[in-house]
Structures are given as structure tokens and as C-alpha cells.
Amino acid sequence: MSAYFHNRHFTPEEAKELLHTVRPLCERLLKLKSTLDELNYNLYKHEYFGGLGPNGSKFHPPELEEVVKIMRFFEKEGVVVKSLEEGLIDFPSLRPNGEEVYLCWKTGEGDIAFWHTIDGGFSARRSMIEW
């Protein structure tokens, strides 16, 4: 059994390379979340507010299926989605000293410029200069 929380770890270079694929997917997730909000669909409960679909259809919107597809891709790649509302994701990584951390990126940022400890979270982000 591994002493680490995650099975896959990215080097900063690997995370930056995958970011080329991840960036447009995060932007798409933000648009899908916005559309679902406009439809009064609760993404977290997988139901429309009030429990039924438009006109009582009980069907999930197609936007949800696309969200699930993107989330499965992230899971398969080892990318951790922290916030659908902000497009915030983490790449598990190991610092040179062996400490397991997250390389942190948020939609709108140009590159992966921050990292934080596993339990530190967004507010504890540190510059990659301190890597």
C-alpha cells in the first residue's frame, strides 16, 4: 500500500502539457454548469429543483451527460476537480522532497503557477517559485 493519497503524480512539466487538453474542458464545464443553472437543474443532486424535469419529464438534461463525460476523463487522467463553479482543478504531484502536494490551476490563469499541500487548499496556494 502506498503512503500517498493519490496513485498518479504529475511533474510540473506533465501537468502543464496536460493543461492544453484540460483548459478547454474546464471552460466547457463552466458553460455547462451555467446552462444547467439556467434550467434550474441541481447538478449536485442530479434533479431539477422541485424534483422533476420540465413539464414533469423526469429526464436528465443532455448537458449533465456531457459534464459526466468530462468528469470521467479527468478522473481517468488523475486530475482532481475542486470547483465546477470556478473551474478550479488540481494535479497531484510530489515535491522534490517527496511531499505529496497539488499543482493548482484555475480557469482564466495562463499557466500552472501555484501549488498547495494536500490539506492546505486554494487559500494556501504558494508560488511555483517556492517549489
Image (cartoon, grey):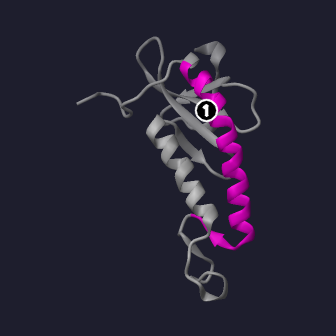
Residue 24 occupies quadrant: top right
**Magenta segment main secondary structure:** helix
Residue at 58 percent across and 14 percent down: it is 131
Give left or right: position of 119 versus 127: left
Q: Position of residue 116 (x, y in %)?
A: 56, 29
Residue 52 occupies quadrant: bottom right
11 falls in the magenta region: no
Residue found at the very far front of the displayed protein: 62
Give left or right: position of 102 versus 32: left
Query: Is 120 in front, or is 73?
Result: 73
Q: Position of residue 39 (x, y in %)?
A: 71, 72
Residue at 54 percent across and 20 percent down: it is 14
Query: Is 83 in front, or is 65?
Result: 65
35 falls in the magenta region: yes
Q: Residue under label 1, please give it.
A: 124
Q: Secondary structure at mark 1?
A: helix
Magenta extent: 14-43
Amino acid residing under circle 1: Ala
Residue 123 occupies quadrant: top right
Quadrant of the drawing holding the N terminus = top left
